[in-house]
Image (spheres, rainbow, N blue to C red):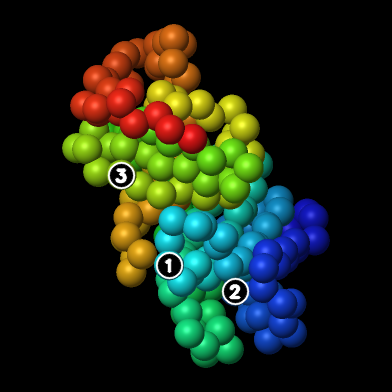
Amino acid sequence: MQTPLEINYQHVSRSEWIDDYVKSRVAKLEHFSRDIVSCRVVIEQTQNPHRTGNPYRALVEVNLPAKGELVAEKSDKVTDPQVQLRPIIRGAFEAMEKQLKKQSAKRDGKVKHHNDEPIPPVATVVRLFEKDGYGFLKSLSGEEFYFHKNAVLHHDFDRLTVGTRVRFEPDEGEEGLHASTVQIIDKPGVGGAADGEDDLDMPAGWEQNTGR
């Protein structure tokens, strides 16, 4: 890696065993891709007043020279952090390993057809809580997904407004549906992709649920 590993703790006490475990998982990532420019890992207990238990979350951000930023995360409720944090961290790194494998396959010419790859679903931002750093998306099927600001690619959380369309990776845990790897497609009043790929209708009822 070109820059030193960055490990951040948010509402979690720094732990030597977590540091060592994260370093071992990052070393494994470098076996999947030698092009990693930087890696940032966040270990946090999410502060969401609308959720009970405030689950713990591990987020892994990797920067590649050509692809840019890749993000993977895993969250769950924890009663014993010393025991249960490890599988959460492992889950986030395993999700990142899958992304790096896919990128390596593309680079090596093993993935030839872009259209064969599943396209992440589209959703609309329906509620934002800027001060607390989270919000909710509504998918085209009408389901709502919680997302944290760290899941928004390119640090674009501040660019989001109610009505912004995004692509995202859906996930489901004990606390319900949540979104990771959130990427802005377009903002209200701004055209989407030039090829019309993202010319999709807003999910029904999104404009009626815009409280902040």
**Residue 119 appears at what percent x and percent y?**
31, 38
**Residue 1 appears at what percent x and percent y?**
73, 58
Q: Which residue is found at the position 45% from the left and 27% from the top?
A: 162
Q: Is residue 187 depicted above or below 176 in this figure? A: above
Q: Does the rendering let one see residue 97?
A: no
Q: Does the rendering let one see residue 122?
A: yes
For marks 2 and 1 on the same chain, the one whose residue lies earlier in the sequence: 2
Instruction: Name the kind of residue labelled 3 in the image.
Output: Glu
Report helix, strand or loop for mark 1: loop
User: Would you name the residue on which mark 1 appears?
Assistant: 52
Disc 1/disc 3 C-alpha distance (Å): 17 Å
Residue 115 appears left or right of 27:
left
For marks 3 and 2 on the same chain, the one whose residue lies earlier in the sequence: 2
Instruction: Name the kind of residue labelled 1 in the image.
Output: Thr
For marks 1 and 3 on the same chain, the one whose residue lies earlier in the sequence: 1
Within-10-Å neighbours for mark 1: few <14, some 14–19, many 20+: few
Q: Is residue 209 depicted above or below 74 in this figure? A: above
User: Would you name the residue on which mark 2 appears?
Assistant: 25
Instruction: Name the kind of residue labelled 2 in the image.
Output: Arg
The image quadrant of residue 23 is bottom right
Disc 3/disc 2 C-alpha distance (Å): 32 Å
Q: Is residue 58 depicted above or below 109 in this figure? A: below
Report helix, strand or loop for mark 2: helix
**Residue 117 appears at what percent x and percent y?**
29, 42
Residue 188 appears left or right of 8:
left
The image quadrant of residue 149 is top right
